[in-house]
Image (cartoon, helix red, strand yellow):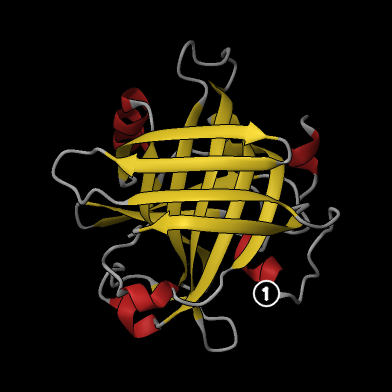
Amino acid sequence: MYKELREVEQRPYPLPSSQWMMKQTWSNMLFAHWPVSADLLRVHIPVQLKIDLCDGTAWMSLIPFQTHHTRLHFMPKFPFYHSYLELNVRTYVTYEGVPGIYFFSLDANKWPIVTSAKIGAALPYKHARMKMTIKDPVVHYTSQRQHPGSSRECFQASYQQSSSIYVPDKESLEYWLLERYCFWTLKGNTLYRGDIHHDRWRITKAQADLHHNTMASFLPRHSFQNEPLLHFSSNKSVFTWPLKKVR
């Protein structure tokens, strides 16, 4: 058994009883978090979900990273498409008291990934022209959405870790933001849950220059005027399970 599957005490609910479906690695992740108005978010979130608040505040996160070594259970990694860039825009929700994530968008730079993820996971993937270069220790990341019929949102940042690695305390905001093990998505009018697993987050504080950011264009830009809370993770092995209909 993978060591990650033995580390489960951080989960608010047990691992799924079925076999995981897909495994991949996320690397060079920047977490940029902003407090936002729950009232502004409410109209953009399915009515079945409740916005999760930490000390009365809702949060929005932008997360650029690289995915690689993507493979299905008992299969080798995908030829040509196991590695790609991704940029997630998400917020924090609950369903019947279970904490998780709701994605507003997931940009990726390879069309087959966008298409298969939209079909298989019912997630709002968009195609973007993306680039990541590393001039140690700084990661330079750019994304310009190209998806037909969608707004051409873009993101450009340079970031690096700025502390030693640590494990967030269970009572901290960092733990609340990061230790999430499912997401919800709508397919038609039906709500589905997708489960994931990884070991506890070992993160560092981060330093970032956000050169350009028009992501989450449905929100007024003053939502991003404050300095974000920043974290960095160099590497994370992740397991995913098939979607399950919940309502």
Looking at the rendered structure, the kind of residue marked 1 is: Leu
Question: Image point 46% across, 12% down: which residue?
Answer: 80
Q: Is residue 165 above or below residue 45?
A: above
Please give left or right for residue 77 compared with residue 130 in the image.
right
Task: Tell me the residue that label 1 is attached to.
Answer: 173
Across and down, in percent, residue 223 comes to 40, 76
Q: Position of residue 47 (x, y in %)?
A: 28, 72
Instruction: Identify the residue shown where x is 26% and y is 67%.
Output: 218
Q: Could you tell me which secondary element the residue under label 1 belongs to?
A: helix
Residue nearer the viewer, 74 or 132: 132
Above-or-below relation of 168 to 195: below
Q: In this view of the protein, which residue sits in the foreground, 117 or 28?
A: 28
- Residue 121 against residue 180 in the figure, above or below: above
Rendered position, 43 above or below 128: below
Q: Identify the residue at the far left of this view.
A: 149
To which quarter of the image does residue 189 belong? bottom left
Residue 237, image quadrant = top right
Mark 1 neighbour density, 10 Å: few (under 14) some (14–19) many (20 or more): few
Q: At which x and y percent is residue 224?
A: 43, 72
Q: Quadrant of the N terminus?
A: top right
Question: Which residue sits at x=86%, y=54%?
Answer: 164
